[in-house]
Image: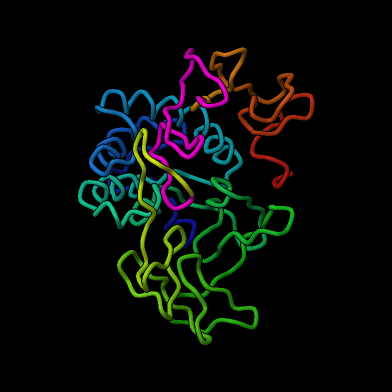
């Protein structure tokens, strides 16, 4: 994608200023909460509670990473992507949405890092520009590497997109839920069961959970059962972990920003502690 095309995609049709990472959580909470409740993806009873839970975790855990990457000029929130994701979540079949940033919601973020640039797991993998994908090394740091399109020749250094697989020297789209998987592998996040690609069954509060029956958002699998997590100011322990902070003497406290003294990584926004909380986006971008 050219710079001009990327800029137009970010601004959108309205011609107004582009959306910014600091607004991401508030811009998407309505659409995701409607989808979560419709599809049983969050262990809450009503939209209002979903809004509270979504915003607390999104603003504490994800938005700091998005903002840091935006400030570095390697990631941008897309106006067109926001519209496409909102429309998609209204009607997508629950078993077809493998992850939050799946389908049209993969357009929410525009990576601006060209081939050869740094990337990392999770949010930090989104920095790779169109036509590249994040390839991780043994140290879990990676680089954006050029890819070829679906249907193109692959192998011998020609890499397929993340949504494709190299099969008999050709990039083919991975199977979606419901597709046969006797030859073509399933999309990332789905698994092959009885020769059909399937997404994991989401377990509710009190239900049995394991690797193939993950707990809904706002809950956690402890002792083989889904239990509710605690939020800021609520009581926490080994069976009731914090959903957006860390357990400080039995009460969930806000995560520490970079440079603050810490004892463990789970106290820090960055997840990394070396006496003080490391700065985002992490060692892979140094």
Residue 218: x and y in percent read 41, 31
Please tell me whether residue 226 belongs to the stretch shown in magenta.
yes
What is the basis of the colouring in this image? rainbow
Front residue (pair 115, 87):
87
Depicted 168 relative to depicted 254: above or below: below
Q: Residue furthest bottom?
A: 168
For the magenta stretch, what is the residue range?
211-240
In this rendering, position of residue 201 left or right of residue 114: left
Residue 14: x and y in percent read 28, 43
Which corner quadrant holds the C terminus? top right
Q: Which residue occupies 42% across, 27% down? A: 228
Q: On the image, which quarter does residue 82 sit in? A: top left
Q: Which residue occupies 73% across, 58% down? A: 138
Front residue (pair 129, 170):
170
Q: In this view of the protein, can residue 8 be seen by the observer?
A: no
Depicted 169 relative to depicted 198: above or below: below
Front residue (pair 112, 177):
177
Residue 172: x and y in percent read 43, 77
Please tell me whether residue 259 belongs to the stretch shown in magenta.
no
Front residue (pair 278, 109):
278
Q: In this view of the protein, can residue 275 be seen by the observer?
A: yes
Q: How many marks?
A: 0
Q: Which residue occupies 49% across, 27% down? A: 243
Query: What's the magenta bit mostly, secondary-structure-wise?
Result: loop
Q: Residue furthest right?
A: 275
Depicted 167 relative to depicted 188: above or below: below
Depicted 8 relative to depicted 227: above or below: below
In this rendering, position of residue 278 left or right of residue 65: right
In this rendering, position of residue 40 left or right of residue 53: left
């Amino acid at each position: 994608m050219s710079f001009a095309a990327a800029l137009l995609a970010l601004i959108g049709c309205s011609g107004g200023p582009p959306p910014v990472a600091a607004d991401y959580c508030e811009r998407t909470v309505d659409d995701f909460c409607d989808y979560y409740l419709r599809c049983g993806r969050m262990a809450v009873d009503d939209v209002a509670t979903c809004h509270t839970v979504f915003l607390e975790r999104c603003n504490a855990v994800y938005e700091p990473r998005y903002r840091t990457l935006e400030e570095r000029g390697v990631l941008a929130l897309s106006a067109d992507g926001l519209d496409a994701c909102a429309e998609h979540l209204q009607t997508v079949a629950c078993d077809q949405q493998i992850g939050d940033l799946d389908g049209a919601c993969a357009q929410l973020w525009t990576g601006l890092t060209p081939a050869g640039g740094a990337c990392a797991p999770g949010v930090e993998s989104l920095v790779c520009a169109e036509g590249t994908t994040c390839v991780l090394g043994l140290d879990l740091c990676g680089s954006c590497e050029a890819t070829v399109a679906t249907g193109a020749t692959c192998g011998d250094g020609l890499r397929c997109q993340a949504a494709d697989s190299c099969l008999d020297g050709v990039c083919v789209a991975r199977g979606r839920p419901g597709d046969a998987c006797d030859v073509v592998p399933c999309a990332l996040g789905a698994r092959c069961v009885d020769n059909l690609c399937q997404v994991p069954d989401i377990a509710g509060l009190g239900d049995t959970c394991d690797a193939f029956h993950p707990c809904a958002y706002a809950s956690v699998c402890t002792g083989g059962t889904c239990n509710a997590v605690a939020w800021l100011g609520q009581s926490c322990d080994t069976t009731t972990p914090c959903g957006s902070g860390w357990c400080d003497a039995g009460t969930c406290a806000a995560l520490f920003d970079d440079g603050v003294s810490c004892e463990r990584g789970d106290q820090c926004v960055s997840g990394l502690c070396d006496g003080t909380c490391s700065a985002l986006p992490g060692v892979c971008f140094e």
